[in-house]
Image: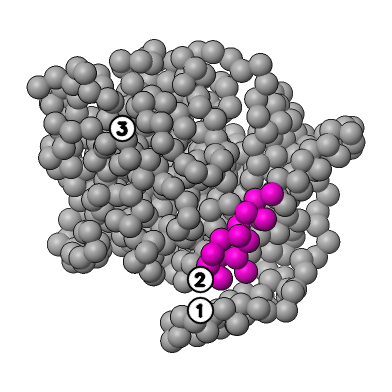
Amino acid sequence: MTSKGKKPNVVLIVADDMGYGDFGVFNEGRVNTPNIDELVSEGVCMRQHYSASPICSPARAALLTGRYPHRSGAITQHDLFGLDRIALRETTIADTFRFGGYKTGLIGKWHNGSLDQRYHPNSRGFDEFSGFCGGWSDYYNWHMDKNGKIEKGDGTYLTDKLTGQACEYIERNKDENFFLMIAYTAPHSPFQAPQTLIDSYVLKGYDRITATTYAMIEVMDRGIGSILNKLKKYELEENTIVMFTSDNGPAFFNPPFMLEPEDDLFNERFNFGLKGSKGWVYEGGIRVPMVIRYPRCLKANTFNDELAHFTDWLPTLATLCEINNINEFPLDGYDLTNQLKGEKLEKQPRRFWQWNFYYPSISTNAAVRDENWKLVRPMIAGTRYYNNRDLHVSEEDTLRTAAFIEADIKHREDPTSVINLLKVPNIRYPNSEKPELYNLAVDPSENENVAEENPEIVSKLLNGLENWFDSVENDRKKIDDPLHAY
């Protein structure tokens, strides 16, 4: 059959903890990614594209809602406290496509509500779900949620399993309009991959963790090739929007319990010269790949240097797919349709980021980008993720973490008790670090802090950042759920 006359299908592929430096085409062949590289040559590659957060759940929430994650309640990855949840009042991208007459499917990682069926993907607009609701999974000993029923792993490598399910979904729905999100876990830990493939990278001189990470990416790339071939087999490729991105930048910290004696606590794999990594609002934590292929509409082999952000994709896809009913709440994202076709905006809107453990604090790990200027409120010394090679935790952070661990334990025993336990003393962070200012047009690696030379720009951007934070926090506190609103 042909796809003439149909609305376009959408296949949205999301990697986990993958950066620009993990593309073969961008890293001088360090990792073998022929299918992802081919997507780059066949589509539009966004070179200034940003996640909405340097950490998983908030980033995914923004992609799913078109709104900053603070507004939706998904402010961090702590699912045991419900802080990964997208508030029930929010309309998801799956809701939007279902309203538009599409079949909707999610295969892989959810991590936007794992402990309450009201937040299950099947309750958030996805007709079909096959994956897991939490933040990670073993690659061999997995347990998969298939529309609410648990399937125990059979030894199949998880990435291959997800690929197979994606191909089956396309085959089942080839005659329908469909929106399919494939949320791979690769290359997120645990570091597991077929040993022969790991060995091939070790022979190239990489340490075990980096070699395993590259092997995990190569298996995912192979799976993407299978998905693209399935679209080609059913003559769907001309009328299917295929997108590939990552939830946040690469993780360089290696969890100690996953290491062998000879392993380092950190890996230093190539990240295209970007500063920082997962968890940070520097470019290395939030600037992530986005490739979009749509042969019927977009020019192939194009590099686009206009700004783009996770919140933009819901309104953009709605336009491309002719869906009018999007969301009763104002979106933070913008329709990039004309931008994807090569038009330049006279002025780019400001973009904002903030993330810290548990409840948000504007005093740490926050940023705003205005045209080429980027202001960073650095992560405060002594708090989590501070300093790649000298992690340490302040007394204040230790006390706060202990309070939440206690709440976690009580929550498992009695979910209602967490509300009172979370009212811990208001432990203030230490004095914040001085703001930093970078001109990304000349310093994309954020090496030269020019804040002292530009006090007026610093003042203007700080004011804008604080106003934004007040706005998104006020919206979050209106959520009708005590866990979200506290």
Asked whether 480 falls inside the magenta stretch, the response is: yes
The amino acid at mark 2 is Phe
Asked whether 479 falls inside the magenta stretch, the response is: yes
Question: How would you classify the magenta stretch by its main secondary structure?
Answer: helix
Asked if residue 88 lies left or right of residue 137, the reply is: right
Percent position of residue 442, x then y: 71, 23
**Alpha carbon distance from label 3 to label 2:** 32 Å
Q: Kindly indicate the quadrant of the structure image that contains residue 44.
A: top left
Q: Earlier in the sequence, mark 3 or mark 2?
A: 3
**Residue with the mark numbered 1:** 408
Q: Is the N terminus in the top left, top right, bottom left or bottom right quadrant?
A: top left
Q: Residue furthest left?
A: 1
Q: Which residues are magenta?
A: 471-486
**Residue with the mark numbered 2:** 81
**Residue with the mark numbered 3:** 10
Compared to 145, does 56 lie above or below? above
Percent position of residue 129, x then y: 26, 53
